[in-house]
Structures are given as structure tokens and as C-alpha cells.
Image (spheres, rainbow, N blue to C red):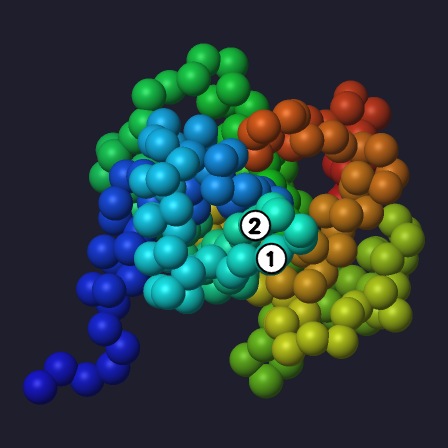
Amino acid sequence: MKEGPDISKVAALMGDPARSNMLLSLMDGRALTASELALSSGITKQTASSHLARLLDGGLLEREVQGRHHYYRLQDTDVADAIEALLSLAERKQGKRTRTGPKDPALRKARICYDHLAGELGVLMFSRMSKQGWLTQVDDMLCVSPKGWQGLHQIGITQTNLPRTKRPQCKTCLDWSMRRHHLAGQVGALILNRFFELGWIKRLPDTRIIEFSKGGEASLRTWLR
């Protein structure tokens, strides 16, 4: 008799092309309506509603109702991490989608992975933070070191900014395009939000692409020296 969770049920939910397109559309952390998700998947709203019901029942999505509108988002960061891991595997096995021209290099350079920075610049940030001793292991948990908090303070982030949740302070996430880790968790989310506040980055409409201004990218690299 097999032991442990049954991964086949989750795999079946994610494996359908329409449902996988819906999940990917939610990887930037936004909540979308059934109509928006139907459009992103190239299916009718009625068909989308059926798929969304299965994703809700399977615990991959959550729904928020505001008046007549129903909004759907990923259930939590664990779902986002699983999708990113599958993207990494698909990339390695050449299970690629059609290339989208200029957007593809931009997506690989910097993008939103649920609520943190991914892509080339996300991996660079994690690598530099690790090499400089800004991150440390405490009881097998990845955390910001005292030196790291000094570094984060340079861009206006302090320990008081951490939300009181059970979510890990720091967490590695395997980047599908770089095959290396970027930074997730509470601190990863705080950093991305701070980049927006500082005006270093903007998100291109209807994509997961994060675009750094010339000054923003220069400031990022200077901060990480």
C-alpha cells in the first residue's frame, strides 16, 4: 500500500491545458474574474467556470466575492512554488510554449513569481545576498542575518515591516528560466514591494514581466555590491 499524499489528484488538476493556463495567469499574484481567466485560456466562460470549480475543490484556488463579481487567486505560496517548479521541469524537458519574441527575453530577465522577484535579476539578488552574508540558516530555516538587516535598511526595510504570519521569513524558490534559486518568503515580498515604491520597477500590463528603469537596475546593482 502506498503511503503519503496522493499527488495524482493535484497533477491531474494542473495537467489540463486550460487549467494550467489559468494557474499561470494568476502567477503574478493578482485576483482575476472567470471572464478574464477564460480569455487568457482561450475557452468560454461556461467552460472556465467548470474548471474553476475543480480548482477550488482541489484547494489550488481561493475565491473572493465582491458584489456580483467573483475573483480568483492562487490559494497560497505553496501553489505558486509548485507551479514554478513545474515550469523549471518543463523548460528542462523542452516542453516550451511558442516563443513570444521580445517578451520572452524580458520575461527571463525579471518577472513576478506570485509576490517576489524572479528571473535573471531575482537570481542575481539572491546570489549577492547569500555571498555577502545577508542570509543565514537558523534551525534549518533561512533567515536574514544582522548584517542582512543592515543591508535591507539601506532601501528602507526593517524587521518591523515583517507581517505576523506563519509564512517563512525567507525561502528559496527554484527559478524555471535560470535553474537557480531566487528569494521568496516574507522578505522576498517586502523587497519587491519596496522596489515598486522606490520607482525602480514597473510591471508591464497583462504580463508577469517586471521592467527595471535604467536608474532602477543601476540602483539594484549598487545596493547589492
Question: Which residue occupies 85% across, 33% down?
Answer: 199
Residue 142 is situated, as x and y percent measured from the top left of the image, at 61, 71
Residue drawn at the location 59% of the way across and 85% of the way down: 139
Which of the pair 69/157 is nearer the observer?
69
| Residue at position x 51%, y 55% in the image | 74
Q: Residues within 10 Å of mark 1 (few under 14, many from 20)?
A: few
Mark drawn on residue 115: none
Specify the label residue 70 is tagged with.
2
141 lies above or below 180: below
Give the residue type at disc 2: His
SS at badge 1: strand
Going by the image, does 93 lie left or right of 38?
Answer: left
Q: Crowdedness of circle 2 by 10 Å Cα count: few (<14), some, many (20+)?
A: some
Q: Nearer the viewer, residue 148 or 187?
A: 187
Residue 171 place in picture, x, y as percent: 58, 64
- Asked if one can make out residue 3 in the rendered structure from this viewpoint, the answer is yes
Q: Is residue 98 above or below residue 58?
A: above
Asked whether the residues under the numbered discs 1 and 2 touch, taking CB atoms below 8 Å apart as contact, a structural biologist would say yes
Amino acid at circle 1: Glu
Residue that mark 1 sits on? 64
Q: Which residue reaches farthest top?
A: 101
For the residues marked 1 and 2, what is the alpha-carbon distance in whole angstroms? 6 Å
Query: The C terminus appears in which quarter of the rendering?
Result: top right
Mark 2 secondary-structure assignment: strand
Q: Is 164 or 26 nearer to us in this picture?
A: 26
- The residue furthest front is 68
Q: Depth check: 34 or 126 in front?
A: 34
